[in-house]
Image: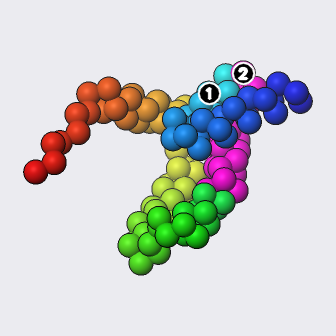
């Protein structure tokens, strides 16, 4: 239990910094803890719900989050999560893992090659 607590604390911290703790948590759960992909995916989602709620409340309190501007994204995200969760139940876990890995590669390449536009 000690090592799991330390790893999850570190991953929560990295996630708060925006490093991508969710991706690292998936690797930890599937590779080192030998959890099946669907269980790891569910655990990953549940792991970040409390921190997301706390961060959202803090940002609302500090006037860095506008619910009227965020609501369309929240609604679309919830609808997409429901739709793709239902669709994903019918897919093979190894295919979902490959799709997730491909998505991580695409995001990683984007982060490496992205150059911000100059302000006009």
Mark 2 or 1, nearer chain start: 1
Is residue 98 in sight in this rendering? yes
Pointers 2 and 1 in contact (C-beta within 8 Å) = yes
- Residue to which mark 2 is pinned: 32
Q: Residue at x 58, y 70 (%)?
A: 61
Would residue 94 appear left or right of 118 to someone viewing this image? right
The location of residue 54, given as percent across then percent down, is 66, 60
- Residue to which mark 1 is pinned: 27
- Single out the residue that lies furthest toward the bottom: 68
- SS at badge 1: helix
Q: Main secondary structure of the magenta part?
A: helix
- Out of 113 and 31, give the one closest to the viewer: 113
Quarter holding residue 114: top left
- Single out the residue that lies furthest toward the top: 32
Using the numbered discs, state the Cα–Cα distance from disc 2 to disc 1 in whole angstroms. Answer: 7 Å
User: Total label count?
Assistant: 2
Q: Residue at x 66, y 53 (%)?
A: 51
Q: Is residue 33 magenta?
A: yes
Q: Residues within 10 Å of mark 1 (few under 14, many from 20)?
A: some
Q: Which residues are magenta?
A: 32-52
Would residue 54 appear left or right of 75 to someone viewing this image? right
Q: Residue at x 38, y 29 (%)?
A: 108
């Amino acid at each position: 239990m000690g090592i799991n607590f330390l790893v999850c604390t570190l991953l929560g911290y990295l996630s708060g910094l925006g490093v991508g703790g969710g991706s690292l948590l998936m690797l930890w759960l599937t590779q080192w803890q030998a959890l099946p992909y669907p269980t790891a995916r569910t655990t990953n989602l549940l792991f970040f719900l409390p921190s997301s709620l706390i961060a959202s409340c803090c940002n609302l309190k500090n006037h860095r989050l506008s619910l009227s501007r965020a609501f369309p994204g929240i609604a679309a995200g919830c609808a997409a999560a429901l739709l793709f969760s239902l669709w994903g139940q019918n897919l093979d876990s190894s295919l979902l893992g490959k799709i997730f890995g491909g998505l991580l590669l695409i995001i990683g390449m984007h982060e490496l090659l992205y150059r911000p536009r100059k302000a006009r």
